[in-house]
Image (spheres, helix red, strand yellow):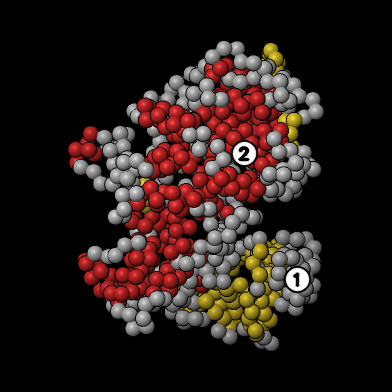
Amino acid sequence: MGGSRPDAARRVIDNLLARPEFGERWGRHWMDVARYADTVGYTLANKPPRLEGSERYRDWLIRRFNDDLPYSDQIILQLAADTIDPDNKSGDLDAMGFLTVGRRFLSNDDTIDDRIDLVTRGLLGLTVQCARCHDHKFDPIPTMDYYSLVGVFNSSELRDKAASPLALFDKEKVGDHPVWVRGQRGNRGPIAPRRFLTALHGEEPPRFENGSGRLDLAHAIVDTSNPLTRRVLANRVWMHLMGKPFVDTPSDFGVRTQQPIQAEVLDDLAVAFAEDGDSVKRLIRRIAGSYLYSQSSQATTDAVRNDPDNWYFGRATRRRRDFESLRDTILQCAGQLDFRKGGAPVDIAESPDQSRRTIYAFIDRQQLPAIFRVFDVAGPDAHAPQRYYTTVPQQALYLMNSPFILKASVSVVDAATKALPADATNEQQVAAVFQKILKRSPSTEELRLAVQFCRSEIDPETVAIVPASAWAYGYGKLNEGQTAIDGFTPLPKFHEGRWGGGEALPDKQLGYTSLTANGGHPGQHFDTVRRWIAPRAGRLEIAYQAEHPSDKGDGVRMLIVSNGERLSEKNVQNSKVAVDKVAIDVQPGQAVDFVVNQNGSTSFDGYRQTIQLRLTPVRGLPTEFDSLADFSGSTDAGNSKLLTRLEQFAHALLVSNEFTFVD
């Protein structure tokens, strides 16, 4: 944040705080706290898993962070907007997604427990959930306090015809709840009055008299006499900006928590936060404008020896980018980032071409996509105090081989060099790519090595094969001799994990013709064709397993054809078959078609099929292909063309520590 002007850093900070992307960045941080997801989790009786209106809470967060709505007002709206904006005229009823975007448990008791845990750990840094079955073992939280909050949330309900599907409202009949001794429903103890936590009130807390008590609870939480609320938030903001929190357990400020070394700084920030009207932007400005924030991560040997974990913040904390920042920055460098705001979530796992900011990604609570787990995105099952970053091989493998990163490497070069003259030198191209990705010029030695690399020849046989790039998904008809496909045509639409003619089945033109990761359905007039195209010359070994699971219909016929030869043919009806193994020699570009057609009728012709291939090239190491693991919704899966040397260099910078770490 340097510059020649003495106020350069302040101007940069103010500019970033004023951008609409500020709300997207900090809204995503809060979504971890709120255990945000777009599905309810496990469902029964084939109920749809989609959590209706989940994105409305996400968009409310973004809007209110950008507006710099005081944190105290944010809390009140997230707990009790039904008392302030009951008709959603200001859109604030959507704020109650804080309570309702969590998992919907089979037992309402568990849903209430989840909401108590969210409010107490997320806002107060207290593990009140521990008192469900017994008085807290360490903190002064009796079981009576837990069931006081049970009464609050048990007196609240969702309503089908509300102005927001996310809102809670008071039940017609509200009331206190009995203590369940040892947490057992039938073991009733004394009645717990709806009131605030005794540990934070200093005396017998007054009863909540305003309906369910959610509004009273919200006011008690934001009251300036409460010592925890602003400390907890200041600690979270410091953590996101500085790379580590003062209190290493951001959602547990209990007596067992180690006293922070810099407790006075945390107190000072919390007091200033309150004096500034609970302005999150002012709190961020205060921290980001400090000397501590502007430090380098470089440190002397003595500094590292005396404070190896950097608890005294004598240097900047080097840390890996979170997944959202990494993906968005790659898209931005490639000139592909979609800046549209709000709206329905998008599936970035099944559609790698999707270029919306990662905050708009669809979060499936029940089946969190592997890419989110690999890069340590907070699990949405429960409130997440902080993200714990791991270093595992899958991260490097994704950054080296995924269709997303390979395509971005090509686009980065296009974006970086488009302003250069047609006869630009290698030096000019390398410098432009450096500037585009790392926002700096290369050193003399970096430039020399990069140019040397870009001028070297590519040996295609040394380039790793991306398995997903070898597959194509289409339809056609076997020729008269049934040894080849006439008129192979790619299926035009990928929707909800299926290639087909359109979003709905049957399609007007292609009927039920479709392919999924583990099977498909032939059409009346077209065969399904899962095509594998040889990336190299070599020996190909083929095995597959298939099943026609229905006890109705006339089954399907499965064939393997390649180079004018029928390699295998199986009729499958209410049975399972396996082919193990067929071996052939293939040349680069040779197609091997796995064809399935109907046996006279398309009724009950849904089938399952998984294919395993092993290509042993003339040169190089063998490559394994698996139709299930390699299945993709992209028409450019893996970017099968070889990257140029300059594109390979861009790829190397995109996966470098300098790019993937905040340093």
Residue 214 in sight from this viewpoint: yes
From the viewer's side, name the closer residue of 431 and 529. Answer: 431
Numbered circle sitting on residue 261: none
* Three-letter code, disc 2: Phe
Give how far apart the Cα atoms at labels 1 and 2 are.
Answer: 40 Å
Please tell me whether mark 1 or mark 2 is closer to you in this view: 2
Report the side of 523 relative to 411 (left or right).
right
- Secondary structure of the residue carrying tag 1 is loop
Residue at horizontal 68%, vertical 81%? 477
Q: Residue 228: x percent and y percent?
A: 49, 26
- What residue would you read off at disc 2? 98
Q: Residue 482: x percent and y percent?
A: 66, 83
Report the side of 326 relative to 37 (left or right).
left
* Three-letter code, disc 1: Asp
From the viewer's side, name the closer residue of 70 and 425. Answer: 70
From the viewer's side, name the closer residue of 515 and 580. Answer: 515
Residue 651, relative to residue 220: is it above or below? below
Residue 390, relative to residue 347: is it above or below? above
Badge 2 crowding class, 10 Å Cα cut-off, few under 14, some 14 to 19, many 20 or more, is many
Going from the N terminus, do you reach mark 1 or mark 2 first?
2
- What residue would you read off at disc 1? 507
Residue at horizontal 59%, vertical 56%? 341
Residue 563, relative to residue 71: is it above or below? below
- Secondary structure of the residue carrying tag 2 is helix
